[in-house]
Amino acid sequence: MTNGTTIIPSRLRFKSAPTVDQQVNFDLESKENELTEYDRIATVNLALLFDAERQGSTTFRPTFKISPVYDNAYTGTTDYNPFLYNLWYVDSASSFLSTTWRGFPQYYEFEFFRPNLVDQHIPYTPKSAYTYNWTYYLSLPFENNYTKDLFWTDSINSISWKAQDGIPFIIRNTTNNGTNDISFVCISEHNLNVGEYVELSISYDNNNLFQVNTLGDGTFGSDLYIFNLRNVGYTGNTFDNDVVGTFKKIIDITNSGESKSSYYIKMHKIITNSNDLIVTKTGFEETPFSSNKKFEFSSLTPNNISRVSQKNSSSVYTFTLNYDLDIRNILDNQKRPLNEIFLTIINKGFSGYFNKPTQGTGVKQGWQFNILELNNLYWDQNNQISNSDIPYSSYTKTNGSTETFYYNQDLKSGDTICGDFCEWNNITQEERIISPYYHKIAYNQDVFKSEPSPTTNPSGFYYSPHIGNVIRVFSDYIETGELENVDGTPSWAFYSTQLEQFRWRDIYSYGFKDGLNRGVDFPFLNFAHYPYQADLFRVISDGGYQIGGYIENGVEYKEYKTRGPEFGPISGFSLGATTLVTQPIIDECE
């Protein structure tokens, strides 16, 4: 201690902190003030006072900058005039001759901000501009749902399980470098290392614990999805091809009970109402994608009125809570101090293009492993497992035709909603996202006919509703403590009876970042933290869209690009993969 200053070596601040040279500079600039109270005088270091207030504050005003990215991919037609007169028309000349006008709904059906339109469909209120298409909330992870029913299918194989059962697989028997392997092809990343063990839902000779011998099948990225057991001559049909099951990860076979991972759906609690967030369009920033504007000539529109139509938009938005949020004594789903706040975006679809309800719900819900292939049967309207709990409402209008329009009702503070499929391990004290949570919306085929023929599983759009904003970071180092030092351990520490020790991860202080650049350092002003997160909000189409065409033997063909939204070796799609499909022209709205 020198002149009232205590020097703490950097390596003692956190066990994982790097060792750096430190020095104390002295200059003539005053950084201390004398506060006089009656006959007592106290010297206050302003920097230390600021840091103490910062570390002790539990008040937050989070801000999110969100860039919507969507592909307005489906054309169709409608008998409802306000919709028909405002499409982004395709092949207007053919539509004029056939009197069947086809096109895309315009960009404002997807945007966060719905502009003032004179479309004779719904009355427009400027203060509600941000609430017609989507609603926005803050949510917190608050508990784990271990018994949630899950389902996966690739239209050939299917697996039903509960979240607590682990990660599903399909068995493939293979030969690698002259050795016979039993390959377990997983529907999502398995998070296993060679030498670790798995507990299978199937057993051989009353044994269901096996050591992982190798990973992958030799193709790029397959080590993330495939783990292998050496086939030492197993008989019977336990490990036959196409056998399905689930597994749980075990880090230490000598401590299998405590080192076995647990699996669950992370549940979110809505903590704001629909009008508690301030939504603004950024002044000059846009996404780098085309907006696809064009002029519709009056001679080539069904109502003989010329206008400018727009297929997509490139706007960017910011979301800020309009009051300070106090997270004092709020715990997350693992009963640790809250370390992440989420912006939750839910499709409302008040215009009625989407969300025709089936079995009491308009929005379908699933996880990333459910969007591995086009038109996955998981999303079929008759599959109750993919139903969400979001309530809906409706209204009816007549203009050219009489239609019923459905939309999703607002959520309120205290409501709960599903989140990601996760894995937790007590020994590593880490939570891993196995598969992110998604919603699916689809056009109401009574209102906008985008399908060539009626189906219970129409093509639609996927989006992930939860966008996280990290407010605290847990250390990359696992702290341990003995039982006699229980007073020095945090409330979220796990006690291992096998190891006879507490295990936990410390929380980094605000402003500190470790050697892996883990940590947070956002502004602190007026006794409140101002965390900031910039992210994309992707609305992913699961069908195809036209990219070209040609004529062969007098038959006109169109070329479509189909998209497998995300990865996975079972589906055969990889990230960004596209497949060209050529087919004769048909009127897809007949």
Image: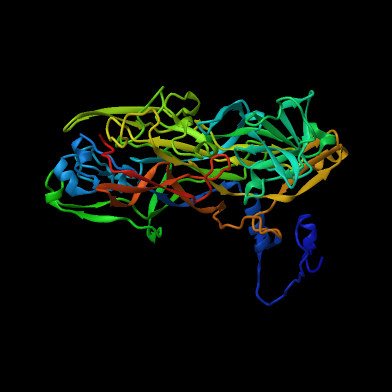
Q: Nearer the viewer, residue 288 or 391?
A: 288
**Residue 175 falls in which quadrant of the image?**
top right
Residue visible at 26% across and 39% down in the picture: 587
Examine the rendering and report whether any part of residue 302 can be seen.
Answer: no
Q: Nearer the viewer, residue 263 or 482?
A: 263
Tell me the quarter of the image containing the N terminus. Answer: bottom right
Point out residue 182 in the picture as x, y percentages from the top left corner.
Answer: 71, 36
Point out residue 78 in the picture as x, y percentages from the top left corner.
Answer: 23, 36
Q: Nearer the viewer, residue 471 or 148?
A: 148
Examine the rendering and report whether any part of residue 265 can be seen.
Answer: yes
Tell me the quarter of the image containing the C terminus. Answer: top left
Left or right for 83, reference 191: left
Left or right for 573, reference 186: left
Task: Give the tally of numbered discs.
Answer: 0
Point out residue 540 in the picture as x, y percentages from the top left corner.
Answer: 43, 44
Q: Which residue of the protein is positioned furthest toward the front in this rendering?
A: 553
Above or below residue 209? Residue 188 is below
Q: How is the image coloured?
A: rainbow
**Residue 3 falls in which quadrant of the image?**
bottom right
**Residue 9 falls in which quadrant of the image?**
bottom right
Point out residue 459 in the picture as x, y percentages from the top left corner.
Answer: 39, 37
Residue visible at 48% across and 39% down in the picture: 373
Left or right for 41, reference 326: right
Left or right for 178, reference 581: right
